[in-house]
C-alpha cells in the first residue's frame, strides 16, 4: 500500500473514532451541540490524532485511553479554529470552503461552541473507564494536554499573534518563533507526547517526542510562510502572497525565502533523524509516523 | 464571631489562595494573562470556593488538592462571566461597577482570556502534586468539574438561555427550570460535590451534597427573579423590574410573585433540612456551611 492509501485508511479510523465521541442531542441545549458537531465535521486533515495514534503504535501502546484522547486533541484544535475565525479575531466567513461556525450559528453560539469543545475534550477523557493502574499516566497525559493548549502553549501563541498584528513591522524573529512554537507546535507536541505517555514510554522517550514534534511543528509553520509566497493560486486555493499583501510579518519577510527554505529542511531533517534513532531502538525502521511527519513538510498546500 | 465577621475572614483566605494560582507574567503572551487576572480580581462573592471549602470542612477533609480546586472553580465561574458579557452575548460594559474584560482589553482578548481561564482551571489542578492514593479522587473531582461546567451543565444552561431570549414568551416553566438548574445550580453542585469528594466522603454523601446544592442553587436563582421585582432601586443598584421591562420570562412572570416566594422557601427549607441530617451524622450541628447557604437565600441583593 502506498502512503496515500494508508493515510486514507487511517484517517477513516480517526473519523470513526471521533464520531463515537460527538455530543448527543438534548432539547434545550441542542444548538450548541449542533454547532460543536458542525465545527468538528467541517473537514480537516486530522493530523493531531493521527500523530498521537502513530506515536502510540511506535511505542506499542495498548491502552484504550488513546481513543478519547485522540478525539480530545481534535476538539481542542477545532475550538481554537472556531474562536480564531470570530469577527473579533480573524473575521473569517469561510474555512476549507465551508462557512465558519459563527457564519452559520451566529457569533454568540460560536463562542459557546468553542467553550463547549474545549470543555468536552476534558469531559470525554474523564468519562472514560480509567483502570487503576492507568490513572497516573492519564493524569500525566491530561497535564500535557492542558499545558500545551493553554497560555503557556496555544493560547499564549494566539495572544502573541494578536500582539504581532498590533505592532506590525516591529515584531522580530524571536517574537515570530514564539508564535510558531506556541500557536502551532504546542499541540503537535501534545499529540506525540500523549501517544508516548499512554503507551508507557520512558520519560526520555516522551522528551524525545516533544523535541521531534517541536522541530516538525515549527518547520511546518515556516513552510506555510514559504508556500504563501511561492504557491500559485490554483494549488493553494487562495491568492499567493496574501501574507505580504496583509503586511504580515512572516519568517520569509524577516529572513528571506532561501533562508526560510533552509530552515524548513534543517529542522525537519533534525526531527526525522531523531525519530529514526527511536525507530531503530523500537525495531521499526519504516514507521508510518515518519512518512506522516515528512508529508507535513513536503507538500504543496 | 458573628456571621459577617466569619465570612469576611473566610473570603480573605479564599482570595489569598486564589492569588497563589494567578498566572505569572510572560513577555509575548502577557496581555491574555493581564486580562485573566483583571477578570479574576474584579470582585465577586467567591461563593463557589467558599461552598467547596466549607463542605470539605464538614467532612473533615485534609487533602491539599482542595486549594487548586477552589481556585479552579472560581476561574471557571469567572470565564463564564467574561464570555457572557461579550457584545455577541449580553453586551455588558460594566459588572459590579467595574468595566468588563472586553471593555478594557478588547473583544478578541476577552475571548482568549475566557478560554485561558477555563483551560487554566484544569492546568492548576493537574500541575499540583497529586499523591498516588489521591489520584482516584482527583480524577473523580475533575470529572465532576468538567461535567458540571460543560454542555450538560453550565454551557448547556447558557445555550438554553439564549434560546429563551430568541423565542421570547414561548419559553415555558420546564425550559426556565432547565436554565436555572444548568446555568446556575450546576457549578454550585460541582463546588459542594468536589468538597465532599476531596474529603473522602461516601458516594451517598456526595449525592446528598449534589441534591442540597441543586435545591439551593435553583432557590437562589428564583430569589433573583423575586428580588428583581420587589427590591427598590437603592438596594439593588439597578432599576426594579428590569426583567419585566426586557420582556424576559422569569419564574415570577410564569408563576406569580407569591408562588415564587413559596418555591424559594420550599426548596431552601428542603436543602437546609437535608444538610442538617448530615451535620448531625458528622457531629457538627451549626456548621458555617449552613449559615452560608441561608445567606444565599435570605438577602436583599
Image (cartoon, coloured by chain):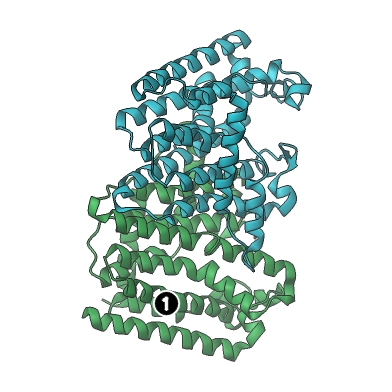
Chain colours: A cyan, B green
The residue that appears at 59% across and 31% down in the rendered structure is A7
Q: Quick check: A129 left or right of B283?
A: right
Say which element carries label 1. Answer: helix
- Residue A188 in picture, x, y percent from top left: 49, 32
Residues A271 and A200: in front is A200
Residue underneath mark 1: B211
Q: Quadrant of the N terminus of chain A?
A: top right
The residue at the far front in this view is A1
Q: Few, some or many C-alpha atoms within 10 Å of disc 1 (few <14, some 14-19, many ≥20)? A: some
Residue at mark 1: chain: B
Count of marks placed on residues: 1
The quarter holding residue B232 reads bottom right
Q: Is residue A257 visible?
A: yes
The residue under the point 62% across, 33% down is: A8
Q: Which residue extends farthest top? A: A258
- Note whether residue B301 is visible: no
Amino acid at each position: 500500500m502506498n502512503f496515500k492509501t494508508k493515510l486514507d485508511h487511517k484517517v477513516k479510523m480517526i473519523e470513526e473514532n471521533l464520531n463515537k465521541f460527538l455530543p448527543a442531542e438534548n432539547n434545550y441545549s441542542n444548538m450548541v451541540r449542533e454547532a460543536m458537531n458542525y465545527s468538528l465535521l467541517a473537514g480537516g486533515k486530522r493530523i493531531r490524532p493521527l500523530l498521537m495514534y502513530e506515536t502510540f503504535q511506535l511505542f506499542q501502546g495498548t491502552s484504550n485511553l488513546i481513543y478519547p484522547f485522540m478525539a480530545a486533541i481534535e476538539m481542542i484544535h477545532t475550538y481554537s479554529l472556531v474562536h480564531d475565525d470570530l469577527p473579533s479575531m480573524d473575521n473569517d466567513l469561510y474555512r476549507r470552503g465551508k462557512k465558519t461556525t459563527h457564519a452559520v450559528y451566529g457569533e454568540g453560539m460560536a463562542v459557546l461552541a468553542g467553550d463547549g469543545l474545549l470543555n468536552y475534550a476534558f469531559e470525554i477523557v474523564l468519562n472514560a473507564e480509567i483502570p487503576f493502574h492507568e490513572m497516573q499516566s492519564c493524569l500525566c497525559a491530561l497535564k500535557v494536554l492542558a499545558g500545551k493548549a493553554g497560555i503557556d502553549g496555544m493560547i499564549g501563541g494566539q495572544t502573541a499573534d494578536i500582539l504581532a498584528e498590533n505592532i506590525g513591522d516591529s515584531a522580530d524573529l524571536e517574537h515570530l518563533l514564539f508564535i510558531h512554537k506556541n500557536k502551532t507546535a504546542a499541540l503537535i507536541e501534545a499529540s506525540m507526547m500523549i501517544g508516548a505517555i499512554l503507551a508507557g514510554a520512558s520519560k526520555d522517550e516522551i522528551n524525545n517526542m516533544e523535541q521531534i514534534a517541536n522541530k516538525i511543528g515549527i518547520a511546518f509553520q515556516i513552510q506555510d510562510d514559504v508556500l504563501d509566497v511561492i504557491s500559485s493560486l490554483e494549488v493553494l486555493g487562495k491568492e499567493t502572497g496574501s501574507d505580504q499583501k496583509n503586511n504580515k510579518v512572516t519568517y520569509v519577510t524577516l529572513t528571506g525565502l532561501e533562508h526560510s527554505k533552509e530552515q524548513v529542511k534543517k529542522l525537519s531533517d533534525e526531527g526525522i533523524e531523531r525519530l529514526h534513532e527511536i525507530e531503530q531502538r523500537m525495531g521499526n525502521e519504516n514507521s508510518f509516523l515518519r512518512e506522516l511527519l515528512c508529508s507535513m513538510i513536503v507538500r504543496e498546500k
